[in-house]
Structure formats: structure tokens, C-alpha cells
Amino acid sequence: MNRCGVCSPSLFDNKIVTKIRHRRKGGSMLELIALLFGMLIGMVVIGWASLPAWAWILANFDICFTFVEEGTAKAVVRGKEFHKFLLQSKEMKFRERSWDIVPLRPDEQPEKRYWFERWSGARWVGLWPFFSIYNYKFKWTVAKQEEKDGKIVTTPDMRERTIGSIYIRDVVYYGKVESAETTDNTPVDVEYLLTVRVTNPYKALFRVHRWLEAVIDLTSQRGRQYIGTRSYKQLIAEEGDEQNSGFAGGIQALRGHLAKNFGVKFVYADIASVEFSGTTKKEYVEASTAAYLADAKAVAIVTEAKAEAKKIEIKGKAEANALKARMDQFQNNPDAAQATINGDVGKAMGLDKLVGAVIKGMKG
């Protein structure tokens, strides 16, 4: 008999059961870890595969991703500090170490994108909320053409919005110079259309306050100086000038200043309309109309006089030609000349009527 009971069957069985239980606990833990790891891998794979869909959804709210329209750029800020630009163009690129926009060379390709950017069309901004799109208030005026009293008139349409992009292509804006005096001391309001293109969005957004308003102010100031060198009729003649001269040529001096300081390229300027301004607008219109009517009447009188003179000239030439033909006939046939003279004399004395009456009576 074993007093210690070490080798008793019951104790031996208990040790075996305990070992089996420990093994089962260890196996369960490993299985749990493997399961969690597999789920993590699955989530990563599914998340990576669905990243374009998530990018598209988040881009609608400018969270981590954003959409950039073709021909525009968006500024990305880190907190309140400028970080980078996102450019969307198949023909343009940023010059190295600057934010100047230049054309792509024929052998160059547009900027490379991540695969999820190509699939979703969204652009990677950065980890939100540390990186975000720079939004700013933009105020501009466009020209709307409407038909009024049978004429096409240009009316300004002012707009103001908070936007997060900037155009890098040619855009036409509306401007107006008010109460400018011409060389003939006529006060006029000149509406013009200004075509510009942003060539350095960093300068336009971060070096000048409200770049478009500043450009319009400078253009209007230069335009006022140009108007002072032209008469009212000369300005009217320059409406719709397509030779990039006249009004556009008058503000060409701003080209270098705008490009260097504002990052904006001056493309073209065109006078849309010229109107009398001030409280005397009605009087100027009436005087101009009266002058126009007087000129038109004078032209009509001159035209009528010329027509009458032409008529007399033509009639005189016809009579001269007829007389010349008769003289040639008389010279070639003296008898016919005598008969003609006798006939003319008889007609003058009334004999032609008498002879006609006698002949008529004899026939009766």
C-alpha cells in the first residue's frame, strides 16, 4: 500500500485531465488570435479595395479628399498655413520651385496620381482635420446680354460666393468706368469686358487681397486715362474692336505689373458700350439726336441736289446728242433740212392744225 498516494489511479487521472484542460485553453487563445488577425487582414483588404468608393464619398465634403475641376486649382492648407496646390489640367503643370503655371512639353506627361485617385476622380488632400481646402470669398461681375426694345443690351450680373478653387484658363469679367471725360469734354460711362488668366495662383490668392477686384480697379483707372485721350465718336468707333488695339492697347502697360505682382495675365479688353453719364445725360442724348437728324437732313438735301443736277446733266446730254444728229442729217440732205424748217415754221404759225382740219373735212 502506498501511503503517499502518488501513484494512485485517481491522482494520475486528475493530472491528465488538468493538462488536457490547459492545452484546450491555450488552443482557444491561439484560435482567437488567428481569428482576429484574419478579420484584420480582411478589413484591410476590403478597405483597400473600397478606397476609391470612400474617396469619392469623402471628396464631396472635402474631407481627406476633394474634387478638382478641369482647368482649375485648389489650395491646401495645414491649419492656417499654405501647404500645396492641387492642379487639374492635361496641358499645364507647375514650374519647379515656384507656383507658376506653364504648358507641358510634348514629351511630358501630366502629374502622376495614386491608383484610387485615378479610379475615383478624387484628389488626396491630407489627414483631416490637419489638412483642408482653402476657401475664400470671391466677388465678380459677368456681362449678360439681353434683348430690349429690339436691341441687344449688356447688363451686369454681380455675384459673390465662398469658393475653394481658382480658374487657370481664360475668363471674361465685366468692368465699368464711370463719369470719364473725353477730349471733347463729354462725360461718359464705358462698360468693358476684361479677359484674364491666372498664371500663379499663389500670388493671386496669398499676395493680394481679392485679386480680381484689384485687377478691375487698376484696369478702370488706366481705362479712364485712355478715355481722356479720345473723343466720343472715337470711343463709339472702338466698340467691338477685334484687333487688340484701341482700349485694349491703352491698358497694355499693366501687363507686366499684373503678371509680376498679382500672378495674372492680361489677355484682352474690349469696349462693350459707351453711354452719356451724369445728370445731363438726357440733354446730351437729345443734342446728339438733334445733331444726327441735322446731319441726316443735310445729307438728304445734298443727295437730292446732286440727283437733280445729274438729271439736268443727263437731259442736256440727250438734247445735245439729238441736235447733233439732226445737224448731221441736215448736212447730208439739204431738202430734208428745208422741209424740216418749213414744218417748224408752219407749226409755229398754226398751219399744221389748219391743214389737218382741211384734210379731215375732205375725208368727211
Image: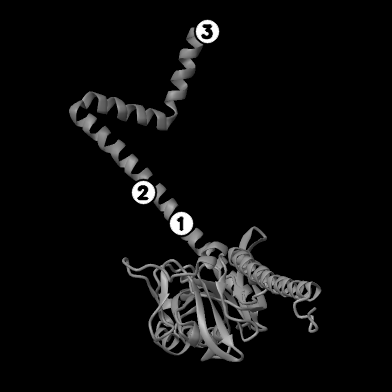
Q: Which mark is residue 356?
A: none
- Say above or below: 310 vs 19: above
Q: Which residue is mark 3?
A: 364
Residue 153 visible, this orientation: no
Q: Amino acid at mark 1?
A: Thr
Is 285 in front, or is 57? 57
- Mark 3 packing: few (<14 Cα in 10 Å), some, or many (20+)? few
Q: Which residue is mark 1?
A: 303
- Mark 2 packing: few (<14 Cα in 10 Å), some, or many (20+)? few
Q: Residue furthest left?
A: 332
Q: Horizontally, is 112 left or right of 24 in the view? A: left
Residue at figure coordinates x 51%, y 85% from the top left: 204
Is 31 in front, or is 145? 31
Q: Which residue is mark 2?
A: 313
- Say above or below: 285 vs 205: above
Q: Secondary structure at mark 2?
A: helix
> For the residues marked 1 and 3, what is the alpha-carbon distance in whole angstroms?
56 Å
Residue at figure coordinates x 43%, y 86% from the top left: 254
* Mark toward the viewer: 3 or 2: 2
Mark 2 or 1, nearer chain start: 1
Residue at figure coordinates x 45%, y 86% from the top left: 258
Is 319 in front, or is 242? 242
- Mark 1 packing: few (<14 Cα in 10 Å), some, or many (20+)? few
